[in-house]
């Protein structure tokens, strides 16, 4: 009985750990993509006045 309960507890803990790893990895990917998008937008905003001045 105790071994079964212990196995179930480990199974639940392993599942929770897996879910948390997926959530953290997704968050890191989201933040990386958002930073890349913002850097690209800032670069385009800085280049826009230069293009207008040449016209």
Image: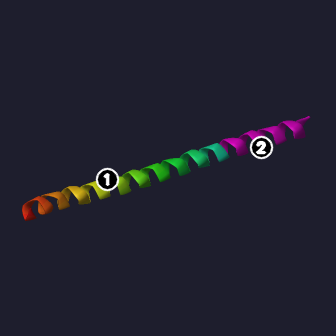
Check disc 1 and report its element: helix, strand or loop: helix
Q: Residue at x 66, y 46 (%)?
A: 17
- The residue drawn where x is 60% and y is 44% is 20
5 on left or right of 17: right
Q: Which mark is residue 15?
A: none
Residue under the point 11% across and 59% down: 52
Relative height, residue 38 to residue 7 (above, below): below
Q: Quadrant of residue 46?
A: bottom left
Q: Which one is closest to the eye, mark 1 or mark 2?
A: 1
Give neighbour class at mark 2: few <14, some 14-19, many 20+ (Cα, 10 Å): few
Furthest-right residue in view? 1
Residue 14 in the image, given as x and y percentages of width and height:
72, 45
Q: Which mark is residue 38?
A: 1
For residue 10, which numbered disc appears in the image? 2
The percent coordinates of residue 43 (x first, y second) are 25, 60
Tell whether 48 sits left or right of 27. left
42 is higher (above) or lower (below) than 15: below
Say which residue appears at 24% left-offset and 58% top-offset.
44
Residues in magenta, as a range: 1-17
The residues bearing labels 1 and 2 have C-alpha atoms spaced at a distance of 42 Å
Give SS at disc 2. Answer: helix
Query: Looking at the figure, which quarter contains the C terminus?
Result: bottom left
Quadrant placement of the N terminus? top right
Mark with earlier residue (1, 2): 2
């Amino acid at each position: 009985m105790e071994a079964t309960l212990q196995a179930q507890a480990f199974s639940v803990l392993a599942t929770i750990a897996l879910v948390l790893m997926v959530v953290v990895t997704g968050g890191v990917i989201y933040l990386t993509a958002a930073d890349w998008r913002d850097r690209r937008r800032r670069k385009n905003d800085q280049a826009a006045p230069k293009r207008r001045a040449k016209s």
